[in-house]
Image (tube, coloured by chain):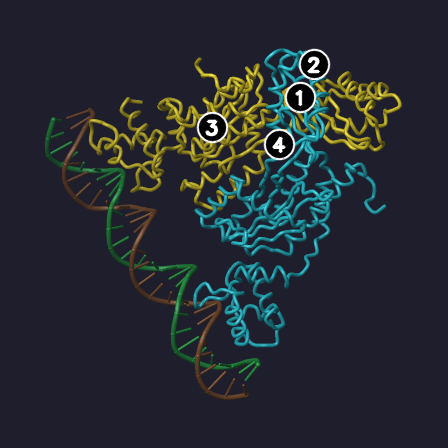
Chain colours: A cyan, B yellow, C green, D brown
DNA sequence: TTTAGCACTTGAAGGTTTCGAGTGCTAATC
DNA sequence: GATTAGCACTCGAAACCTTCAAGTGCTAAA
């Protein structure tokens, strides 16, 4: 492809991203300094259309980038977006305040992604195939009520209320947690088999009656940990773009976002790549997202994917800005969870 | 108001709830058996309009219930909706499976409310003014990493990762949890004052250096517990009603649902009533909800409001069905959290 | 190879017409 | 006095038409 074609394609995509409508041959003369006339551009555009990078809604309209056009733009033509100091500050501040649970950090990041880009932000904890619980703890409240706390291999912490069928006393509950740590820690759901459970029961001696209930809770916990989660923020932003003015289509998109399933599948399918993924239109293989684009980036620690943050918007998304924002956010999150400095350097000069 | 007026008003509201458009004098003759002609109905309708129960979009259109009309309908005319066995079964099944955390139960109930009524479901944990933490526990993971678990007076359990500035050993972490229980349990944020913190520090002796960090985390926890939470499900359902076809208005509504603030305020304002609340149109005092209705019911245990479930939809909501659904759900939830039977009667005959 | 010029296309915007559901009023009826 | 048939009138929704401008492809000249 000639250099001039690239320039023209880039100009068209840029203009389309900004205004949303089809782009005509004259209008791109104004912005870009191309030493040629609109007629030349028309010829080039006709060729670009033949090559599959552009589409024409109807004979007498301008051109619109095709999916392939966006793909080429994202792969080869995109310019690096330099975040403003205000944007950088927002990322640093908001995340510095948050501490603790990854869920909260991801949700906050999704919020921020949404408000910085004006698209919809998505926070994802992907489906995992074999999470284990590394540490158990019990908290006695009353003879008929105690709490089981489980720390997962991913760092997630989950708790469950348990109301035993027979009243228990604090010592028994403590013994239970010791036994759980002894026999179940480090095991994922498939690895908890009958012999292990029997060991556990014999360890509990006279109190083995409570084991079956606890095992059921542990299974539930492991199931919940495997299960993906997803939070969506800033859906309202989408409605400002005319591509979502079709109520029926938007309703379907909303439904997909609520179901979560399709998007979680999508992310699991692409999570092997540690890098940012850009799925344009039908590349997502989700029917209802054929007019949208989804950009997401996994959050990785020690080679393991702990989550992902993403942005969903119209196909004519400001990819440069979205990419920069997601990079910035994920770097920041990874710093937080790696160093775990927990906002203790508040008040210090960041560069001091 | 004469009996016949009531009948006519009820017929109009019923018809409007079903079809959404203005209701003419003829159309209500078909359904209801009223021994009179359309002309008589027109006269009555004119009077009902004068009384403020009906409105006329324009001269030659039928009538639409006014806010006052809905209010009268809900207060005096509504018929009890009898749930189908399938609906009852769904409520019983879905909630029976869920156990443990109230959050999860509420979220599931909101989902169910949405799918049963075809409106938007809302799960709320209201703002509270002085939650305390009744029990603390710590879990040692590594010298640079432990977890603080807090059980709130509401029964909620929260956890925070803590990465101490100086490495600690398991015994110190255990001592910390004992000290927290000794000095802080049962206190809300305002009650934790300097003398108490100093007691805590002196209790910790050589390890008092870690106290300030922990206190900060405890404050955060108490803050988070006070804060309301809200989950929304089934927004997509709303788009099937023509009253939400105005994109701009719907966008604002979406924004309000995301912000959560307005709706949480609304619920706190009305939570004094243990009973179900019906806010029609501007009764909510939220500008953007003037074309919507919000119905919600608090979840109460031992006289304390632990949460609420609600339904948001167009003003012409099927109030009878929504009320029945919310009653059914809240009864069920209150049973679960009171008895805490934790689905242990699976497999038994429910009436056995 | 590029460009000016021109005829042609087409959807969007705005205006007009038609249509029908529904009203209010009046006069006759129960 | 309450009810009802009849009728003129109203007004928005839908359908249709016209105009307009942006944009194209093609041709012939530079």
What residue is pinned by disc 2?
A172
Could you tell me residue B28's position as x and y percent?
Answer: 26, 33
State if disc 2 and disc 4 touch (CB < 8 Å). Answer: no
Outermost residue, right direction? B206
Q: CA distance from mark 1 to mark 3?
A: 28 Å
User: Is the N terminus of chain A in the top left, top right, bottom left or bottom right quadrant?
Assistant: bottom right
Viewer-proximal residue among B86 and A132: A132
Could you tell me residue B334's position as x and y percent?
Answer: 52, 19
What residue is pinned by disc 3?
B295
Q: Residue at x 63, y 52 (%)?
A: A322
What residue is pinned by disc 1?
B152
| Residue A29 seen anywhere in this rendered image of the structure | yes
Q: Is residue B24 above or below residue B106?
A: below
Q: Are marks 4 and 3 on the same chain?
A: no
Q: CA distance from mark 2 to mark 1?
A: 23 Å
Q: Which label sits in the foreground, 4 or 2?
A: 4
Q: Earlier in the sequence, mark 4 or mark 2?
A: 2
Q: Is residue B347 left or right of residue B22?
A: right
What residue is pinned by disc 4?
A190
Q: CA distance from mark 4 to mark 1?
A: 34 Å
State if disc 2 and disc 3 touch (CB < 8 Å). Answer: no
Q: Which mark is residue A255?
A: none
């Amino acid at each position: 492809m000639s250099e001039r074609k690239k320039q023209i394609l880039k100009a068209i995509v840029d203009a389309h991203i900004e205004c949303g409508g089809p782009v005509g041959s004259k209008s791109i003369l104004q912005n870009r300094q191309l030493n040629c006339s609109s007629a030349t551009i028309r010829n080039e555009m006709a060729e670009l259309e033949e090559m599959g990078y552009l589409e024409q809604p109807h004979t007498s309209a301008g051109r619109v980038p095709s999916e392939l056009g966006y793909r080429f733009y994202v792969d080869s033509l995109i310019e690096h977006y330099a975040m403003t100091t205000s944007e950088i500050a927002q990322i640093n501040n908001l995340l510095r305040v948050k501490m603790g649970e990854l869920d909260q950090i991801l949700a906050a990041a999704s919020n921020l992604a949404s408000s910085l880009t004006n698209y919809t932000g998505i926070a994802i904890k992907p489906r995992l195939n074999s999470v284990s619980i590394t540490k158990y703890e019990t908290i006695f409240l009353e003879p008929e009520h105690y709490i089981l706390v489980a720390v997962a291999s991913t760092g997630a912490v989950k708790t469950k209320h348990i109301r035993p069928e027979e009243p228990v006393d604090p010592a028994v509950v403590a013994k239970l947690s010791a036994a759980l740590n002894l026999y179940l820690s480090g095991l994922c759901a498939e690895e908890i088999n009958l012999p292990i459970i029997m060991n556990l029961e014999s360890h509990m001696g006279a109190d083995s009656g409570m084991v079956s209930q606890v095992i059921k809770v542990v299974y539930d916990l492991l199931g919940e940990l495997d299960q993906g989660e997803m939070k969506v923020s800033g859906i309202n932003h989408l409605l400002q773009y005319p591509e979502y003015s079709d109520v029926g289509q938007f309703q379907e998109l909303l439904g997909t976002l609520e179901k979560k399933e399709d998007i979680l599948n999508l992310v699991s399918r692409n999570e092997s790549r540690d890098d940012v993924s850009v799925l344009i239109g039908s590349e997502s293989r989700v029917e209802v997202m054929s007019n949208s684009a989804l950009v997401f980036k996994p959050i990785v620690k020690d080679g393991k994917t702990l989550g992902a943050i993403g942005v969903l918007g119209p196909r004519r998304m400001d990819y440069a800005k979205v990419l920069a924002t997601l990079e910035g956010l994920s770097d920041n999150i990874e710093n937080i969870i790696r160093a775990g400095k927990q906002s203790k350097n508040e008040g210090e000069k960041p560069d001091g």
